[in-house]
């Protein structure tokens, strides 16, 4: 009896080994790395949802290289160390390409590892310049921090016709500092006078002092490059202090309306931010994307979802074009790729950064509208 | 003139932040003065108070009640939480070395933070407007209503607390327990009740601080209490821990020092200046600004 059982077990195990093998050959495995819990999980979940939806669509149309795409998803909790560990897990999971990471600091750390492995890496939303400098195999779908600062300063000068600007920056965040620096440089080039530059730390919740100082100089606009949770606090306090001018920001503003209560949404009235995507854009593909995203996840997609979605298509296109799952071939294919996505027309420059335009979103009366499209 | 107005505005900013620190520091100092325990979970009681506020404000508004009534709910729940924490976590360690109780307090703090992160997600959440107060204009200077309310409230509470400890029977019992709990017990004072009341009051103060904090900074997250608690703890030590007016003074000193550093030196140096003041005060007067220079038990 025991022998029969043992033989049966051996059979089962051998079979499972066999199926495991055949499974690997039938599919192309793409890794997705994103913060799905923690402080920046809103970005991570949206980006991951967009990517997964893109891959599902590609699979429904027959996949790539005649195979279906499977995904390995890792949560890095918004933490640099966790992100590197999660990347290692994906590598041991035998992924052929990586879509991730989502926020800047973890993306830089992961890019450094991916560069050593030659892993084709495409960050949907990591905006800091350093990421793609880590290696020729690292690409991004979104535009960069400096670009956002330049775009916003150009918009302020050409569209809003401002003469003076103030900046308040999160000094412990590369994203915030990157945007502030390029905004300031472009302002000076465009003849806008930056009257004051104030700073705060990562854990600060009280900004009255800095805002009082800024308001005393009466600038036409205030540039606030940070993420939406901090923006909600800064905007509330700025209005309380008595600053009535427009506040400007980057894509970190996306989601700010969700963290303000109904009676407090007016604090971001007359504010503008640069973004990768605008829901007000009337494009058929975008409309389809929004519709199926809402059906699938029950919420309106944001820019992170749109970039995740485009990233899935870009990576799939590159693998198809490479004709194999060879890492170097995929990287080569990405270099010469041209893609028309819902976040704009994308080609990559020599660094692996995209050449594309930015959408300027205006916040007013608790809603968002497309104010302008700006390219440099 | 413009410079003067700016200076006064920054002073008011400092006093506003300081009065929040003071409210929190009062709770710290109250518990330390009686039980000689630094309740590191105090900052997290504020976080709990803030979540209670978050939950009750929409409910009160739908019932047609004023939003500020949430302060009552928060006070009751935080007081219960304080008493329960004392009974469960601190009472069994009352005769252990002080370091054990201190470590337990840190444990309670971490437990509360993570429990709330699990229950309500670590994402910050927005709180509706609690007080609808008009701003007050004094000459060219405009002061937000909430700011004035916070300042007035912290001073009033400090005075009431001082009266309570000095004039009432329960206050007398508290001071007796603080001096010598064994002797107090022999005199017929119920030590357990006294300590429970101390924790109830200390935690109720945390609830008031939580509501005022949420009124000015309308966002809650599970970790909001740790930095606030730390700053208030410094305020309490600076003013002389265990001394009620000291907590008040310490809070205002730190708030104003922070604001002035940010305004006139550098926003990067605010924390350095605050800790620098603390170090200097402790070097010159180890018991704090208002601390009495007598032995351990006052």
Image: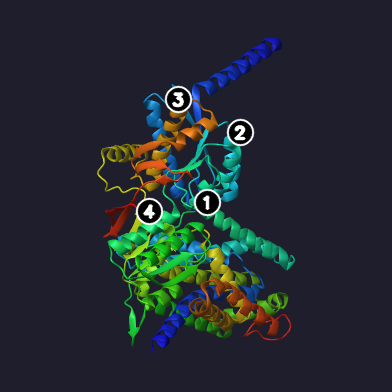
Tell me which numbered mark, 1 or 2, is placed earlier along the sequence: 2
Q: Is A310 situated above or below B75?
A: above
The picture places residue B106, in percent across and down from the top left corner, at: 64, 61
Q: Are marks 3 and 1 in contact (CB under 8 Å)?
A: no
Q: CA distance from mark 2 to mark 4?
A: 34 Å
Q: Secondary structure at mark 1?
A: helix
Q: Are marks 1 and 2 in contact (CB under 8 Å)?
A: no
Report the number of discs: 4
The picture places residue B223, in percent across and down from the top left corner, at: 53, 60
Chain at tag 1: A
Establish whether labels 2 and 4 are both on one chain: yes
Q: Is A362 situated above or below B134?
A: above
Q: Is A268 situated above or below A294?
A: below
Q: CA distance from mark 3 to mark 4?
A: 33 Å
Instruction: Point out which mark residue B292 bears.
Output: none
The mark closer to the camera, 1 or 4, is 1
- Nearer-the-camera pick, B160 or A22: A22
**Observer able to see residue A173:** yes
Tell me which numbered mark, 3 or 2, is placed earlier along the sequence: 3
- For disc 3, the neighbor class at 10 Å (few under 14, some 14 to 19, many from 20) is some
- For disc 2, the neighbor class at 10 Å (few under 14, some 14 to 19, many from 20) is few
Establish whether labels 3 and 1 are both on one chain: yes
Q: For mark 4, what is the residue?
A: A254
Tell me which numbered mark, 3 or 1, is placed earlier along the sequence: 3
Quadrant in which the C terminus of chain B appears: bottom right
Q: For mark 1, what is the residue?
A: A130
Q: Is residue A23 left or right of residue B282?
A: left
The picture places residue A241, in percent across and down from the top left corner, at: 37, 74
Q: For mark 3, what is the residue?
A: A68
Chain at tag 4: A
Q: Secondary structure at mark 2?
A: helix
- Nearer-the-camera pick, B9 or B16: B9
């Amino acid at each position: 009896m025991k022998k029969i059982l043992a033989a049966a077990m051996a059979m089962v195990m051998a079979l499972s080994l066999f199926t495991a093998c055949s499974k690997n050959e039938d599919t192309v495995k793409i890794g997705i790395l994103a913060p799905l819990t923690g402080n920046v999980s809103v970005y991570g979940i949206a980006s991951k949802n967009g990517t997964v939806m893109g891959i599902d669509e590609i699979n429904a149309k027959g996949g790539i290289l005649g195979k279906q795409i499977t995904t390995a998803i890792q949560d890095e909790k918004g933490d640099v160390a966790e992100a590197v560990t999660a990347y290692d897990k994906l590598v041991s999971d035998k992924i052929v390409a990586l879509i991730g990471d989502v926020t800047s600091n973890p993306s830089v750390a992961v890019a450094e590892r991916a560069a050593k492995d030659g892993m084709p890496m495409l960050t949907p939303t990591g905006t800091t310049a350093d990421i793609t400098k880590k290696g020729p195999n690292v690409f991004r779908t979104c535009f960069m921090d400096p670009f956002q600062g330049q775009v916003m300063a150009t918009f302020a000068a050409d569209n809003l016709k401002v003469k003076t600007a103030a900046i308040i920056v999160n000094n412990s965040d590369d994203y915030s500092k990157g945007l502030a620096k390029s905004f300031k440089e472009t302002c000076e080039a465009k003849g806008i006078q930056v009257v004051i530059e104030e700073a705060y730390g990562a854990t600060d919740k009280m900004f009255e002092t800095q805002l009082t100082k800024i308001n005393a100089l009466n600038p036409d606009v205030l540039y606030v490059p940070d993420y939406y949770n901090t923006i909600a606090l800064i905007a509330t306090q700025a209005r309380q202090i008595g600053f009535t001018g427009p506040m400007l920001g980057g894509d970190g503003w996306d989601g700010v309306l969700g963290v303000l209560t109904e009676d407090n949404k007016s604090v971001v009235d007359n504010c503008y931010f640069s973004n990768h995507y605008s829901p007000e854009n009337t494009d058929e593909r975008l409309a389809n994307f929004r519709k199926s995203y809402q059906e699938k996840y029950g919420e309106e997609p944001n820019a992170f979802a749109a970039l995740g979605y485009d990233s899935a298509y870009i990576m799939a296109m590159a693998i198809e074009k490479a004709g194999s799952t060879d890492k170097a071939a995929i990287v080569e294919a990405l270099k010469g790729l041209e893609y028309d996505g819902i976040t704009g027309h994308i080609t990559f420059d020599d660094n692996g950064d995209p050449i594309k335009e930015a959408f300027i979103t205006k916040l007013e009366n608790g809603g968002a509208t497309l104010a302008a499209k700006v390219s440099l | 003139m413009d410079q003067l107005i700016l200076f006064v505005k920054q002073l008011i900013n400092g006093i506003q932040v300081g009065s929040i620190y003071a409210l929190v520091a009062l709770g710290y100092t109250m518990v330390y003065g009686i039980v000689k325990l630094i309740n590191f979970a105090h900052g997290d009681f504020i976080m709990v108070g803030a979540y209670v506020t978050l939950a009750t404000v929409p409910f009160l508004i739908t019932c047609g009640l004023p939003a500020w009534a949430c302060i009552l709910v928060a006070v009751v729940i935080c007081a219960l939480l304080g008493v329960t924490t004392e009974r469960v976590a601190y009472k069994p360690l009352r005769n252990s070395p002080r370091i054990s109780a201190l470590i337990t307090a840190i444990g309670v703090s971490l437990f509360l933070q993570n429990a709330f992160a699990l229950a309500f997600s670590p994402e910050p959440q927005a709180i509706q407007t609690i007080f609808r107060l008009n701003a007050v204009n004094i000459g060219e200077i405009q002061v937000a209503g909430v700011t004035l309310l916070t300042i007035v409230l912290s001073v009033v509470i400090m005075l009431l607390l001082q009266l309570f400890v000095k004039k009432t029977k329960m206050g007398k019992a508290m001071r007796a327990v603080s001096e010598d709990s064994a002797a107090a017990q022999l005199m017929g004072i119920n030590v357990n009740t006294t300590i429970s009341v101390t924790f109830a009051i200390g935690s109720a103060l945390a609830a008031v601080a939580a509501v005022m904090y949420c009124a000015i900074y309308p966002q809650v997250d599970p970790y909001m209490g740790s930095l606030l608690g730390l700053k208030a703890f410094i305020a309490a030590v600076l003013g002389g821990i265990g001394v009620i007016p000291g907590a008040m003074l310490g809070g205002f000193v730190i708030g104003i020092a922070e604001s002035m550093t940010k305004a006139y030196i550098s926003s990067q140096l605010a924390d350095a200046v605050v800790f620098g003041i603390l170090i200097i005060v402790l070097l010159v007067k180890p018991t704090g600004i208002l601390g009495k220079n007598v032995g351990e038990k006052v």
